[in-house]
Image (cartoon, rainbow, N blue to C red):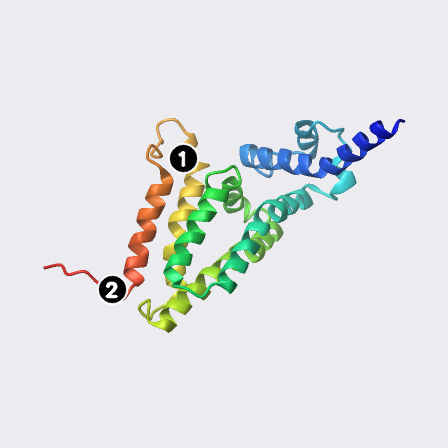
Amino acid sequence: MSEMQAARWQRRKEVRPAEILDAALGLFVEKGYSATKIDDIARAAGVTKGTPYLYFASKEEILKAVVREKLLERVADMEHLSHDYSGHPAVLIRLLLLKWWDDVGRTPLAGLCKLMVAEAVNFPELARFYHDEVIMRSRAIARRLVQSGMDSGEFVAGDAEAAVDALLSPLLMTMIWRHSFACVAGCETDREDPKKRLEAALQLVLAGLSHKTTSTS
């Protein structure tokens, strides 16, 4: 084998895990976790049936790797931004939620949210993994910012967990809807820009948290 061929082979080996994860993401979102077989993932990735097992012990490990590679890096970025931030909490909350929409919500990655909701009861270990690594870490970021706003007087003092629910629910609902009812003929309520609707919902929640009120007279 020539040096050029060897280098090309090495590059191919290095990209195989990424190709397998990309193929797995597409199939998990399209077919669901239960219906997706490792043979299907191999075929979609353009590798032999046994190749995924060189990198991943099971289908469960493939899904965990998809979450780690595709989502947790983004969660870590948000944690970093929130820890280093010293401005108004409302500004960063808005920035982070809309950034999550741009990076995840409007991409196939949003299908992971719907997938985990659908498969949680059937695969409790996977559900706990996603809950601990994605949901709880994301909620902790939002809760820390909400509590900071309440402590500083920018937000009305109250139940921080309920405020987190109100902030995250429109985003979660939009991601789930786009990978469920929006895919069914006759159920398309997604004609308007979903980001604009998210911004409107976020503005309403932040206005409710704010001490600033407008006169109704």
Q: Is residue 208 above or below residue 173?
A: below
| Residue depth check, mark 2 versus mark 1: number of the one nearer the observer | 2
Q: Quadrant of the N terminus?
A: top right
Q: Which mark is residue 212?
A: 2
Residue at the left extreme? 217
Q: Which residue is mark 1?
A: 181
Which circle's residue, 2 or 1, is located before the other in the chain?
1
Residue at the right extreme? 1
Name the quadrant containing residue 23: top right
**How far across and down, in percent of the image, does residue 139 sit?**
48, 59
Name the foreground residue: 179 vs 79: 79
**How far across and down, in percent of the image, does residue 129 sit?**
60, 54
Residue in the image at 82% along x and 32% along y: 7
93 relative position to 5: left or right = left
How many residues crowd around disc 1 within 10 Å: few (fewer than 14), some, or many (20 or more)?
some
**How far across and down, in percent of the image, does residue 82 sit?**
49, 61
Q: Label 2 sits on what residue type?
A: Lys
Name the quadrant containing residue 151: bottom left
Element on which disc 1 rests: helix
